[in-house]
Amino acid sequence: MENDLLSRWRTQYPELFKECFEVWLPQGWISIVEKRLPIIEAIRVRTGLSVEIAQIKEKFGGLRFYLDFIHESIYDEVSKLVDEMEKEAEKTCEYCGQNNDVTTSAAGGYWIRTRCADCLKRDREEVPA
Ligand SMILES: [Zn+2]
């Protein structure tokens, strides 16, 4: 799934993703990034200035979106979008994408996950004692 996502986005946005080495996103967060990529692409096209994404991934239950290379005059505008994505992910279940009762914890296992109450309950039931 992850590698398919990188190749799909690289095809759609060849300039943004030409140096990107990893996209690793849980299912519930794909749309958070997907809806901002056209905005970032539009900034690039409008200004004719470079912006390149290095890596997009989940870490410690949070969304990490790393830029590799960006012209200083569009940095603030693009950083604002990155902040929005990271904040939205904090409130979005990484499994199912819903926003109700979402918490970040290692409960029900070892990995830190950002989950809604339903997905947390399911994880707790699945984990071996
Ligand atoms: Zn969920």
Image (cartoon, rainbow, N blue to C red):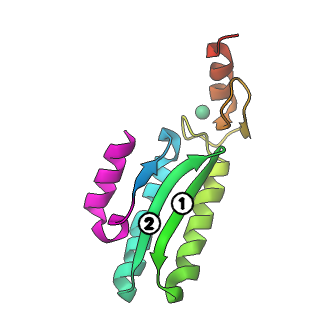
Left or right of 69: which side holds 75? right
Which residue occupies 43% across, 51% down?
A: 23
Q: What distance separates the C-alpha of mark 2 from that of mark 1?
A: 8 Å
Q: Are marks 2 and 1 in contact (CB under 8 Å)?
A: yes
- Label at residue 105: none
User: 107 or 39: which is nearer to us?
Assistant: 107
User: 99 or 60: which is nearer to us?
Assistant: 60
Does the magenta stretch mainly form a helix, a strand or a loop? helix
Which residue occupies 68% across, 19% down?
A: 124
Q: Which residue is mark 1?
A: 65
Q: Which residue is mark 2?
A: 53
Give coordinates of residue 44: x percent, y percent: 38, 79
Which SS class for mark 2?
Answer: strand
Which SS class for mark 1?
Answer: strand
To which quarter of the image does residue 43 belong? bottom left
Q: Residues within 10 Å of mark 2 (few under 14, many from 20)?
A: many
Ligand 1 resides in the quarter of the picture at: top right
Q: Residues within 10 Å of mark 1 (few under 14, many from 20)?
A: some
Please count the marks in the image. 2
Left or right of 101: which side holds 84? left
Mark 2: which amino acid? Answer: Ile
Give coordinates of residue 98: x percent, y percent: 59, 40
19 in the magenta segment: yes
Which residue occupies 35% across, 64% down?
A: 17
Give coordinates of residue 21: x percent, y percent: 39, 56
Look at the image and give the residue range highlighted in magenta: 1-20
Mark 1: which amino acid? Answer: Phe
